[in-house]
Image (cartoon, grey):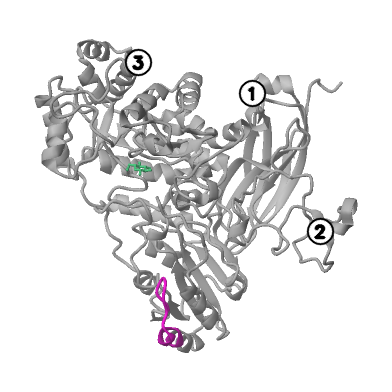
């Protein structure tokens, strides 16, 4: 307990307390200043260090209590210097990429007066229709958790009062990523077991990493909107996990309890939300109006709960050092992209590229090749991706510029070929004409940034038809085709992927995107990223993820339309492979699964070493199982391999996933070089959640394997109740 915070709290009136519990956004500076003067707790960033200081000065010098403001901004993957989108970062399988982004973002933001960011988004995402998959780290809980941790630690470092850190915010709590049908803001409903295992876990890890705040999500869960969910906001987050930071509502999320139909009016909504555990209301009607009248009386919301919320907010301000130094040094404000930040963004972008197909060794492009570059991304600068503010440093280059600079000896021809959504016959004909005389065609295709992000769910996640037309026409010339795919989500590529020789997924790579793409095309960079979110064959497969359960009827072959017109007549004999869990009109599985990714070199895995037996008691006492494997670069160029460790609980009290990721490492090796990669499995890696929310370690056999996307090595582990004699 802080003496300063308690002394302040003791002096505060009901109105002063209530107004600390709100963040509002106002475009107009006069209105911003007025709110600061009246003692609001937080505001969105007025875009400069000078404006932020001016606002802060009013709060400190002109409000009655002089409490400094939390000044917030969504710095999701960069403020000025934009890094790859979070989904792209997850594809690096290298949390250091997220750390670099968060540190750079925090330095730029805090230097300008931002002290609180609404990032990272740690929603696990398994439905590519949902536009916000671009903001998170994909479908896997373990991978997402490691990135959540890296982001939190990168934003906050060791001490929130440093001039180069910001308070982070885990969002959106919770299960927002499971929105039904992938439609943004939609309802969710799920078992407690799945909630614990999948959706709560990334938050649990982020809280353990020290996240200063958590944002409630827009969705209802099992009938209770998250802004009014005491069981989760208070019960799990604050009481069970001991989270002592701030819970903030999402934009107008509290007022929307009225639209959810659980609050009669906004006053009731605010009372419900604060009682449930929301500490800061974002948006809505001011909690205290211009003549000092509070929206709620102490009879309508518990004063003890309000005190607790105020205490949390003041404590965060104290941790940020705002009571001692509310202002930033304007002479040190960073308002564009310094070279070192650009270099960090470039290094990050290079690690996020994923090579998914390279059938004929079409890539890398030979240095002296005749290259045709076409498609909407050839001359576009739309590489920043979703959730970027208007003041972000623009992309200066196109892929055409970058390729010309990177491959000076190539004969490069650039044509439009197709726009994002439209192509004329003339454009296609021109591309076909030049393709015929080229050694390789590079098609830079994809979704523009505006098709992903908040409120940008798609019902159809294929490439726009105009671009597919271009692929088909160019592929028909017989010249090898390499597609570079810029996208904010996994796409369905079924109707063209086998027509092209190579596929390089470039996501939205940020301010240095074109340079990184050109480097990968030329071979200067060897792509080493992996798929963090499954690419389905059809939208009808969604939601889809690698760590599904087996079902009682796991399929062995793909679907087929049955010849027998009356299949139901087979009656109790419905036991053949036809009657297994699949679609009759699709081959088995996804097009590209979690962890897929190729390289310009080859690797081999060998010598998997693991102890074969351990007791429950030893695991519970903290012992672990060491897993080691040797990886070697067996090809002719340097490259990175990603080694993943999977676990399957073979026999359990409840159905378990067919595999669970419990470790991953990305290693760089030169030709002929080998290294030993090691992992350690502990009790938590082998435990499961029960429906009555207990975490248990059940004895039995576990399949353990390492997989680098190309090959696998298997072992078994027996977890026993007694030591072998
Ligand atoms: C989004 C949040 C974001 C907030 C503030 C909302 O619409 O859902 O993710 O942090 O706006 O910008």
Q: Secondary structure at mark 1?
A: loop
Residue placed under numbered mark 1 in the picture? 694
Q: Where residue 173 sits in the image (x, y, percent)?
A: 45, 34
Q: Is residue 604 above or below residue 499?
A: above
Select label 3 or label 2 by which is in front: 3
Q: CA distance from mark 3 to mark 1?
A: 31 Å
Whole-percent x and y of residue 413? 40, 82
Residue nearest the observer in this picture, 708 or 386: 386
Name the residue located 41 percent from the left edge and 74 percent from the top edge: 407
Q: Quadrant of residue 243?
A: top left
Find the magenta span and give its range: 418-430
Callout in the foreground (3, 1): 3
Q: Which residue is mark 3?
A: 302
Of the 4 image quadrants, the one containing the C terminus is top right
Gap in angstroms between the C-alphas marked 1 and 2: 38 Å
Residue 427 lies in the magenta stretch: yes
Which dot marks residue 97?
none
Give the spatial CA distance, label 3 vs label 2: 60 Å
**3 and 2 marks in contact (CB < 8 Å):** no
Question: Around disc 2, counting alpha carbons within 10 Å, would you say few (fewer than 14), some (14 to 19), or many (20 or more)?
Answer: some
Q: Mark 2 — residue?
A: 578
Is any part of residue 448 visible from this angle? yes
Residue 444: x and y, percent?
A: 44, 71
Furthest-front residue in this view:
264
Q: Is 44 placed above or below 325 here?
A: below
For the point 35% across and 15% down, which residue is it? 302
Q: Nearer the viewer, residue 347 or 312?
A: 312
Q: N-terminal of the two: label 1 or label 2?
A: 2
Question: With 447 as the anchor, is 600 left or right in this view?
Answer: right
Dot 1 surroundings within 10 Å: few (below 14), some, or many (20 or more)? few
């Amino acid at each position: 307990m802080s003496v300063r915070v308690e002394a302040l709290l003791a002096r505060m009136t009901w109105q002063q307390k209530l107004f600390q519990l709100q963040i509002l956004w106002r475009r107009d500076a006069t209105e911003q200043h007025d709110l600061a003067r009246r003692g609001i707790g937080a505001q969105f960033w007025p875009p400069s260090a000078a404006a932020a200081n001016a606002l802060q000065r009013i709060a400190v010098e002109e409000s009655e209590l002089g409490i400094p403001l939390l000044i917030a901004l969504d710095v999701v993957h960069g403020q000025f210097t934009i890094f790859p989108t979070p989904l792209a970062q997850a594809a690096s399988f290298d949390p250091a990429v997220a750390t670099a982004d968060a540190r750079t973002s925090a330095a730029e933001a805090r230097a300008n007066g931002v002290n609180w960011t609404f990032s990272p988004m740690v929603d696990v995402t398994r439905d590519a229709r949902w536009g916000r998959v671009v903001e998170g780290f994909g479908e896997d809980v373990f991978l997402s958790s490691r990135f959540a941790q890296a982001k939190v630690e990168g934003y906050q470092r060791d001490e929130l009062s440093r001039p180069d850190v910001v308070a982070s915010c885990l969002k959106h709590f919770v299960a927002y990523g499971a929105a039904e049908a992938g439609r943004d803001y939609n309802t969710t409903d799920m078992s407690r077991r799945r909630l614990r295992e999948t959706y709560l876990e990334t938050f649990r890890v982020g809280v353990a990493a020290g996240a200063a705040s958590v944002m409630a999500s827009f969705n209802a869960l099992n009938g209770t909107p998250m802004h009014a969910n005491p069981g989760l906001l208070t019960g799990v987050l604050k009481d069970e996990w001991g989270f002592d930071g701030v819970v903030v509502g999402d934009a107008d999320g509290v007022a929307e309890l009225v639209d959810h139909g659980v609050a009669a009016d906004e006053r009731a909504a605010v009372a419900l939300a604060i009682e449930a555990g929301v500490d800061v209301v974002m948006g809505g009607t001011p909690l205290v109006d211009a003549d000092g009248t509070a929206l709620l009386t102490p009879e309508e919301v518990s004063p003890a709960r309000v005190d607790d919320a105020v205490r949390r907010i003041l404590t965060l301000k104290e941790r940020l050092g705002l009571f001692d130094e509310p202002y930033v040094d304007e002479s040190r404000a960073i308002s564009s992209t310094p070279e070192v930040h650009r270099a960090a963004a470039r290094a990050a972008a290079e690690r996020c590229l994923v090579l998914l197909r390279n059938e004929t060794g079409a890539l890398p492009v030979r240095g002296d090749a005749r290259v045709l570059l076409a498609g909407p991304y050839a001359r576009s600068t739309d590489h920043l991706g979703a959730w970027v503010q208007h003041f972000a440093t623009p992309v200066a280059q196109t892929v055409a510029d970058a390729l010309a600079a990177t491959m000076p000896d190539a004969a490069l021809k650039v044509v439009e070929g197709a726009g994002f959504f439209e192509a004329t016959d003339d454009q296609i004909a021109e591309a076909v004409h030049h393709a015929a005389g080229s050694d390789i065609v590079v098609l830079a295709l994809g979704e523009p940034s505006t098709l992903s992000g908040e409120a940008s769910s798609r019902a159809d996640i294929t490439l726009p038809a105009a671009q597919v037309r271009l692929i088909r026409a160019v592929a028909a010339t017989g010249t090898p085709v390499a597609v570079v795919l810029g996208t904010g989500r996994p796409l369905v590529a079924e109707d063209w992927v086998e027509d092209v020789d190579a596929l390089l997924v470039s996501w939205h790579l940020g301010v240095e995107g074109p340079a990184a793409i050109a480097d990968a095309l030329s071979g200067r960079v060897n792509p080493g990223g992996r798929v963090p979110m499954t690419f389905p064959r059809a939208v009808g497969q969604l939601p889809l993820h690698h760590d599904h359960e087996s079902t009682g009827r796991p399929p062995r072959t793909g679907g087929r339309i049955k010849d027998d017109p009356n299949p139901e007549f087979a009656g109790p004999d419905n036991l053949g492979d036809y009657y297994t869990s699949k679609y009759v009109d699709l081959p088995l599985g996804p097009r590209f699964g979690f962890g897929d990714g190729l390289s310009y070199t080859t690797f081999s895995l060998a010598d998997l070493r693991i102890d074969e037996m351990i007791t429950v008691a030893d695991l519970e006492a903290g012992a672990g199982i060491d897993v080691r494997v040797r990886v070697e670069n067996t090809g002719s160029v340097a490259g990175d391999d990603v080694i993943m460790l999977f676990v399957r609980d073979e026999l359990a009290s409840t159905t378990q996933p067919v595999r669970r990721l419990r470790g991953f490492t990305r290693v760089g090796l030169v030709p002929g070089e080998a290294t030993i990669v090691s992992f350690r499995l502990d009790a938590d890696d082998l435990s499961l959640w029960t429906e009555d929310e207990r975490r248990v370690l059940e004895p039995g056999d576990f399949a353990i394997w390492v997989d680098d996307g190309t090959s696998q090595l298997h072992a078994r582990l027996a977890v026993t109740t007694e030591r072998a004699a």
